[in-house]
Amino acid sequence: MQQILIKPLITEKMTSDTEKNNAYGFVVANGANKVEIKKAVEKEYGVTVMAVRTMRVDGKARQRFTKTGVIKGRTVGYKKAIISIAEGEMIDFYENI
């Protein structure tokens, strides 16, 4: 079985969403559905998941100017999940550091 949770999203926007709504963001496998994501988070962090929202994020177009000309390309897209957990519970991403 493939790994469902790839890494947590720790950005300014997700941190403010965590403080306001008790929601956490994760980069997940492209083929993962909401039920699999819910089970993986509950097993990994020992919390009660109330809701799961998923979205696919497109890669951004990038271009670089070099001596030989312009190189165009795209960054890799990914699937993102926003997890709402029960009131009074929390996930500490920094406990293993």
Image (cartoon, helix red, strand yellow):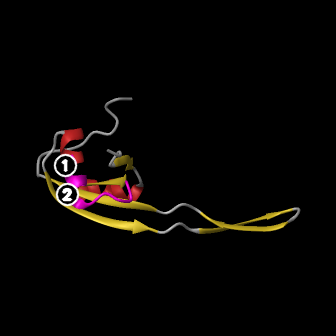
Residue 28's disc number: none
* Residue, far right: 67
**Residue at disc 1, secondary structure:** helix
Q: Label 1 amino acid? A: Lys
Q: Is residue 43 above or below residue 60?
A: above
Does residue 31 show up magenta in the picture? yes
**Residue stretch in magenta:** 29-39
Q: Quadrant of the N terminus?
A: top left
Q: Label 2 amino acid? A: Val
The residue lying at 31 percent from left, 59 percent from top is 81
Residue 39's disc number: 1
Mark 1–mark 2 distance (CA, rounded to whole Å): 6 Å
Asked whether residue 18 appears in the rendered view, the answer is yes
Q: Is residue 61 above or below residue 1?
A: below
Residue 6, given in percent of the width and then of the height, sits at 39, 47
Residue 63, given in percent of the width and then of the height, sits at 70, 68
Q: Which residue is mark 2?
A: 35
